[in-house]
Amino acid sequence: MIKILESDNLFEKYFRFLTLSFWPIMWYKWNVISSRKLEYLMFLTYSFFAGIYFILFIIRYFKSKPEQKESMMFFYRISSIIAFVTSLFSFVLFPKNIPIFYLKLISIFIYLYFSYREVFKKKNDEGVVGIMSFLLLLALTIFY
């Protein structure tokens, strides 16, 4: 278990899997007339995998060395997972709930903040993907 938590490659691929699996769910909800059960199933499946990542990534963060804790990557990835899950929650399950809408807006703006920090402070190009994801999430939020 400890070797799994130390593997950067595993967390990188898992994060990419979560990011890439989020967008087809959003596309499906936006473009396909589907059943409510299938939408619940997609949300629960994504949330399950995101929850596993969230827990393992937090455990890894607390077991890491102090110089690794200074990296903003932890906050960037956690904020992106939270933004994705709250967006799906708001978009798929409760599209007309105003408090959840505000929660979604707050989470995607926090995601934007850490994306900007990744780009401008840490000079990491992964933050550009976060900025583009923010713009897509904001457009889907506004135009739905």
Image (spheres, helix red, strand yellow):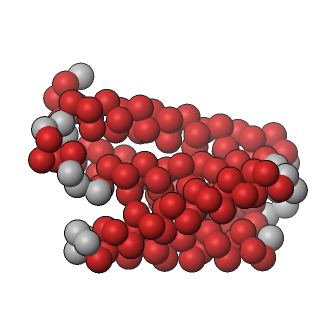
* Residue 100 place in picture, x, y as percent: 75, 51
- 99 on left or right of 46: right
Residue 39 placement (x, y as % from top left): 75, 47
Residue 115, image x, y percentages: 40, 68
Of residues 91 and 70, the one drawn nearer to the viewer in this rendering = 70
* Residue 62 visible in the current orientation: yes
Q: Which quarter of the figure is the C terminus placed in? A: bottom right
Residue at horizontal 45 percent and vertical 67 percent from the top? 113
Give whichever of 103, 9 is nearer the camera: 103
| Above or below, comparing residue 106 to residue 7 in the picture | below
Question: Split into 4 quadrants, where in the image is the N terminus?
Answer: top left
Q: Is residue 118 left or right of residue 49?
A: left
Residue displayed at 50% across by 35% down: 51
Point 70% across, 71% down: residue: 140
Instruction: Look at the picture and state if 94 lies above or below 60.
Output: below
Q: In screen coordinates, is 116 left or right of 5?
A: right
Residue 22 image-quadrant placement: bottom right
Where on the picture, by quarter, is residue 114?
bottom left
Task: Answer yes or no: is residue 92 visible.
Answer: no
Closest to the observer, 99 or 142 = 99
